[in-house]
Amino acid sequence: MADHVAVHRSGLTMPVVTPRFIDNAWRRGCDFVNMDLEDSVPQHMKGYARTLIKDAIANVTKGGAEAFTRINHDLVLADLEGIIWPGLAKVNYPKAEYAEEIELLDSIISRLERERGIRPGAVEIGANIETSVGVANAYDIAAASPRVREFGGAGGYDMSRDLGVEMFVGFDQFVYGKGEVELAARALGLEPHTAPFTANTTGSVGDPDRAFLEAEAARKCGFRVGGGLHPNVVEPQTRGFTPTQEEVDEAHQVLDEYRKLEVSGETWSETDGKIVDRYEAARARKLLDWSELCSARDQEKAEAVARVEAAGA
Amino acid sequence: MSILIRRSNLMVPVTSAGFVAGAWRHGADAITLDLEDGVVPALKAETRELVKDAITVAGKGAADVFVRVNKEFLVADVEASVRPGLAGIMLPRVESPEDVIEAAEVLSSAERTRGIEPGTLSLILLLESANAVFRVREIIAASERVSQVGLDESDLSASLGISPLSDYDPFVYARGRMAIEATAAGVQPIGVAHPLGTLPRLLSGDDMLNAATDSKNLGFKGIICPHPSWVSPVNTAFTPTEPQVDFYNQVRDVFAQAIAAGTAAVPFAGRMIDVPVDEWAKVVIATSTACSLRDAEKQAALKSASA
């Protein structure tokens, strides 16, 4: 695992060609903003869209969010030439199917980092799995570049089209693929980016209650990465992926109890029907680490927003 | 795009004369004449003699006619089966790419001797062991003839030592792996939702339709039907419904208007329509058209055969 753990609980994907989305993105409170050149941008506007990224990076990061860009699967070189500028944290590459694609991306990005004075390795690659070929080659894709730090997918419309299944059915039609990408990510020490199944039969993308339940369920299953399409889901996602105060208190209690065990030499104890042992202590430590990272991230964003507001006043 | 429509595949033991005689009337997209599990060993040789006529009868309703062969009598079974009117063979208990290559070679030589265009006979593979599920990628890739692949869940249960219960699905992983690997290789995965794979039975009306719809949403493109009553609900489940086709036609219109207006993301009916939704809409509409053509073809054959 990389030393630096990213905090990507919430994010909005938006067409970079729609100024009102881009201009307001910094106010949304997301951990990242994913500027889209792909599915939400019409074919005839692809060339124009990529020229907007350089200025948009500064715009969308004003509130402390990280700037990502989703490029087109078939326009890799032109898109990368257009978007790799200081401040861009991640390139999302859709429909990743072969390790060679990621290797190519890596070499182009490395050259552009050199040419444009960006720290080598700064730009992350999001290799998004959206087809059955991608699932079949998941491990090789995830292992293809150290720039791949979060890894996931295996659901969504592209996957549904590839498999020929409807999106909103009452069971998890993607369970195998999600399992495969999670295993690949975990085996390689990457942050898995997927979620357990929570039924959504309406296809709504802007329901805050649903977004919270989904994020909370994902966190309880060991996932920490979110993202969505509608401003309504940002706050509930951020909250759902952040440990609650109650959980933080409980984790402190577990560690207090575990310290006593270390003194007494016992391996486990039970209080109110709950076991405390080495495993529970490790879990508590992990939760507290994550909680601190979340707090630091929230503070960073609050300070950034305050700076913009002060400058505007 | 050309879409193979083989939704229902009715399994018929060649030894049941009445069953064979009536199979063509049920509207199945395919009929598989079984020389394997449906026939006791002592009768295998004489059963082979029945195949020729059975193929002709089974094809009267324009179904693709397959023969399920015995792995251990591959050559004899194929020789008895390959003649005009045969779409291909169903190969059970596939364990390795070599099994598939061997069957493909036997088919090639039978095509040559019978004057059938080379490469036209197709293979449906059945995986029945942990080994086969694990090696699914190389097995599927072994021959261009492979058009469909399925699990034989009963034999897979036996191979894994599972006594299946209807409440617990033992094959979430196996089915998912097969669906992904087959789709990735451009081969159609076929199969049925739990518990009908391990515990096939007759379900009434909507229950069968629902089970078949779940099967479609697992990524499958068709179901092997042990009983004629499955055929109609299976055909229905794998055919896009009229409301679906209407909805996706609207999606295509809304999306085209959005593109003209300079965006490729547009809200519609509470959803966000973008490229992948439009692409899926194209698939649904094309599948609907292909199903209509196949149904018309079968209707015409049925009519002329009944006349």
Image (tube, coloured by chain):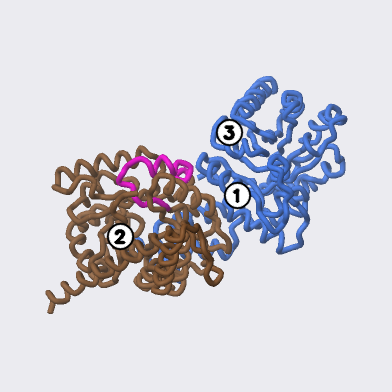
Residue at numbered disc 2: A34
Crowd class of label 2 (few under 14; some 14 to 19; many from 20; radius 10 Å): many
Q: Quadrant of residue A48?
A: bottom left
Contact (CB < 8 A) between labels 1 and 3?
Answer: no
Number of numbered labels in the structure image:
3
Three-letter amino acid code at disc 2?
Answer: Asn
Q: The disc labelled 3 sits on which kind of residue?
A: Ile
Q: Secondary structure at mark 2?
A: strand
Q: Which residue is mark 3?
A: B139
Q: Residue furthest front?
A: A264
In the image, taking residue A93 as reference, residue B3 lies left or right, namely: right
Q: Specify the label residue B86 is tagged with.
A: none
* Alpha carbon separation for disc pair 2 and 1: 34 Å
Q: Are marks 2 and 1 on the same chain?
A: no
Q: Are marks 2 and 3 in contact (CB under 8 Å)?
A: no
Which of the two marks, 1 or 3, is nearer to us in this view?
3
x and y percent of residue B79 in the render? 74, 24
Kindly report the distance in space between the C-alpha atoms of the residues bearing marks 2 and 3: 40 Å
Pick whichever of labels 1 and 3 is earlier in the sequence.
Answer: 3
Q: Which residue is mark 1?
A: B220
Report if residue B10 is visible in the image: yes
In the rendered structure, the colour chosen for chain A is: brown
The residue that appears at 23% across and 67% down in the rendered structure is A300
- As shown in the figure, which amino acid type bears the numbered disc 1? Phe
Disc 2 sits on a residue from what chain?
Answer: A
Q: Which residues are magenta?
A: A133-152
Q: Quadrant of residue A296?
A: bottom left
Residue, x 40% and y 44% (percent of image)? Answer: A188
**Residue A140 covered by magenta stretch:** yes
Task: Give above or below for A229 relative to A117.
Answer: below
Q: Colour of chain B?
A: blue
